[in-house]
Amino acid sequence: MTTPGTTYSYAQLEQLWINAGGSAATAPMAAAIAEAESAGNALATSSNPDGGTNVGPWQLDTNGKGAGYTVAQLQDPLTNATLAVKGSFDGTDWSAWETYANGAYTAFLSNSTPPSATGVPAAAGTASTTAAVTVVPGTCVVPYPTLNLVVTTVGGGCILSKSEARAVIGGLCLVAGGLIALPGLIILVAAGFRASGIGGAAAGAAGPLEATPGYGHAIRYARQRQETRRNTETGRRQQRATEARAAGRKQARTANPS
């Protein structure tokens, strides 16, 4: 791991960003964000409302953009910069950083300051960036595998953290809820069309789902209920018609006795 300095200047932060794989075009904005977040202090830490810790120049949250890394690892300036490049999509999306949201970074932004490599960790590809990363126990769901290449190790880190997994599961639950509700909606709409005597094609919309496990029983049950109601109503109409004819014959006999 690269030994972190205490504080990096704006120009050094620009070069640190570039060394970590960030583009030169987005380096001024990245440096301004780091200045606003930590004054460029690689060892800076602060508490995050989500229970994590914000660490380093870009104040990466151990439960967010820095998930899967220890505080000590995030205090390595090159590691911190590399994760900031990744987390901001190379400086194109800073929405997760508070100093971007509240505009505090604008007080530091300078597009005319050239990067300075003096005292800045080496670019990606050196031993400092190929060292294996230790995943913090309990924070990672899917870790990167670590490969031992004898002279160095590659890999490590976290592919999917617990917080990211919760977000994915929540999205899947919404999709699953929609899929579960859809057949019921189709059945109700189809029953309504059948009851009104229109839309024969629409009434058959539930047909393809009848062969689907779990849905078939519900569809057949709804169809049987609809058929029972229709037969009951038909029987009632026939009964009323029979009673009306009987009453008519009785009235005729009373009016014209033989």
Image (cartoon, rainbow, N blue to C red):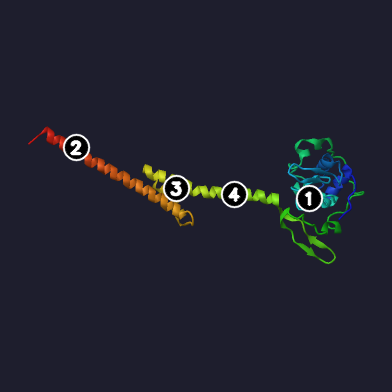
Residue that numbered label 4 is attached to: 173
Q: Are marks 3 and 4 in contact (CB under 8 Å)?
A: no
Q: Are marks 3 and 1 in contact (CB under 8 Å)?
A: no
Dot placed on the residue nearer the N-terminal end, 1 or 2: 1
Residue that numbered label 2 is attached to: 247
User: Which residue in the rendered view is the most extreme toward the top?
Assistant: 255
Quarter of the image with the N terminus is bottom right
Q: In the figure, is residue 89 to the left or right of 235? A: right
Could you tell me residue 67's position as x and y percent?
Answer: 75, 51
- Considering depth in this image, is 221 or 6 the residue closer to the camera? 221
Q: Amino acid at mark 1?
A: Leu
Q: Are marks 3 and 2 in contact (CB under 8 Å)?
A: no
Q: Are marks 1 and 4 in contact (CB under 8 Å)?
A: no
Residue that numbered label 3 is attached to: 187
Q: Amino acid at mark 3?
A: Ile
Q: In the figure, is residue 201 to the left or right of 48? A: left
Could you tell me residue 220's position as x and y percent?
Answer: 41, 53
Q: Nearer the viewer, mark 3 or mark 4?
A: 4
Residue 25 in view, yes or no: no
Could you tell me residue 154's position as x and y percent?
Answer: 80, 61
Residue that numbered label 1 is attached to: 83
Q: Secondary structure at mark 1?
A: helix
Q: Could you tell me how far apart the alpha carbons at marks 4 and 2 are, in whole angstroms?
A: 62 Å
Q: Amino acid at mark 2?
A: Ala
Q: Residues within 10 Å of mark 4 (few under 14, many from 20)?
A: few
- For the point 81% across and 43% down, the residue is 46
Q: Nearer the viewer, mark 3 or mark 1?
A: 3
Q: Amino acid at mark 4?
A: Cys
- For the point 92% across and 49% down, the residue is 119
Dot placed on the residue nearer the N-terminal end, 3 or 1: 1
Q: Could you tell me how far apart the alpha carbons at marks 1 and 2 are, in whole angstroms?
A: 90 Å
